[in-house]
């Protein structure tokens, strides 16, 4: 069966520190992968998506970046975090068009 | 650009009653998908139901059904016989399938549903 793992579940970081959030998918090959951010009490905003290794599309210009070093691995990074980067980050995958996106459990990121 | 509108920020419903959560969308695409997700207080996003723009029948999944009215661009979620465990945020979302469906979903702002005993 297909599963998606995302870690860490919670992260508290100081302003200006780097960030690395990791997401892996099991049980399928060549998934489409996505990073979303959810501000408190709001809907999800798409940050990045990837249709293959090394292929990243950015939806929102910001100080975050994404990478896909392996087929089922998606990483969200930042060199220097801002206070505005606080939020709930969700990774998702889909196996093709007209298929639902399945989400990881999310990472709650607090910037101090 | 796609847009999803959920006009009910919050709803209180008595247990065992049916619930309708409203969703309207705006798109110029001919091929698209509509989704509903449930987000409990723990934060995970749970997929509930999907409707394709070319599907003629309304989608159903157990107690969930999607009332799809294409001409009105609405995709309301109906929950029959509500249960206390249905209390959560509910998000309507759409995808653009014209480009192969790889693009991410556009989400509405959500409806906070509270089921009262």
Image (cartoon, helix red, strand yellow):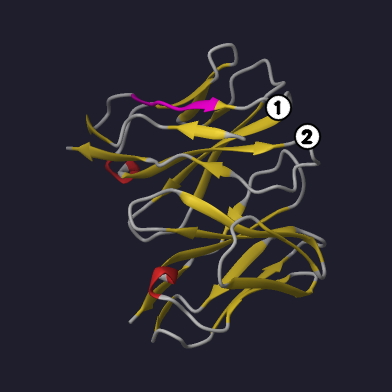
Q: Residue furthest left?
A: B117
User: Dot 1: within a 10 Å radius of its alpha carbon, few (fewer than 14), some, or many (20 or more) residues?
Assistant: few
Q: Is residue A104 magenta?
A: no
Per the image, the residue denoted by label 2 is: B98
User: Can the viewer see residue A46?
Assistant: yes
How far apart are labels 2 and 1 at the CA level?
7 Å
Q: Is residue B15 above or below residue B58?
A: below
Secondary element at image label 2: loop
| CB under 8 Å between discs 2 and 1 | yes
Secondary element at image label 1: loop
Q: Quadrant of residue A16?
A: bottom left
User: Can the viewer see residue A74?
Assistant: no
Percent from the top left, x then y, of residue B34?
A: 59, 32
Percent from the top left, x then y, of residue B86?
A: 34, 41
Q: Residue at x 64, y 64 (%)?
A: A3
Percent from the top left, x then y, of residue B52?
A: 67, 28
User: Dot 2: within a 10 Å radius of its alpha carbon, few (fewer than 14), some, or many (20 or more) residues?
Assistant: few
Q: Residue furthest top?
A: B71
Q: Chain under label 1?
A: B
Q: Residue at x 78, y 34 (%)?
A: B98
Q: Is residue B70 above or below residue A28?
A: above
> Where does the N terminus of chain A fall, quadrant-wise?
bottom right
Residue B29: assigned label: 1
Q: Is residue A8 left or right of residue A31?
A: left
Q: Residue at x 28, y 25 (%)?
A: B17
Magenta-colored segment: predominant secondary structure: strand
- Magenta residues? B19-25
- Please check whether the numbered discs 2 and 1 fall on a single chain: yes
């Amino acid at each position: 069966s297909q599963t998606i793992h995302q870690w860490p579940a919670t992260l508290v970081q100081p302003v200006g520190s780097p960030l690395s959030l990791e997401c892996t998918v099991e049980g399928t090959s060549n998934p489409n992968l996505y990073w979303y951010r959810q501000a408190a009490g709001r809907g999800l905003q798409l940050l990045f998506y990837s249709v293959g290794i090394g292929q990243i599309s950015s939806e929102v210009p910001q100080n975050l970046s994404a990478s896909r070093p392996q087929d089922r691995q998606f990483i969200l990074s930042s060199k220097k975090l801002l206070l505005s980067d606080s939020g709930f980050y969700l990774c998702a995958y889909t196996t093709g068009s007209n298929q639902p996106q399945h989400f990881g459990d999310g990472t709650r990121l607090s910037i101090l | 650009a796609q847009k999803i509108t959920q006009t009910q920020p919050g709803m209180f419903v008595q247990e065992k009653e049916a619930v309708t959560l409203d969703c309207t969308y705006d798109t110029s695409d001919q091929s698209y998908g509509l989704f509903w997700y449930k987000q409990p207080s723990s934060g995970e996003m749970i997929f509930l139901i999907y409707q394709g723009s070319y599907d003629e029948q309304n989608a159903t999944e157990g107690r969930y059904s999607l009332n799809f009215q294409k001409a009105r661009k609405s995709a309301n979620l109906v929950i029959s016989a509500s249960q206390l465990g249905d209390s959560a945020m509910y998000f309507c979302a759409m995808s653009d399938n014209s480009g192969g469906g790889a693009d991410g979903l556009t989400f509405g702002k959500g409806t906070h549903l509270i089921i009262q005993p």
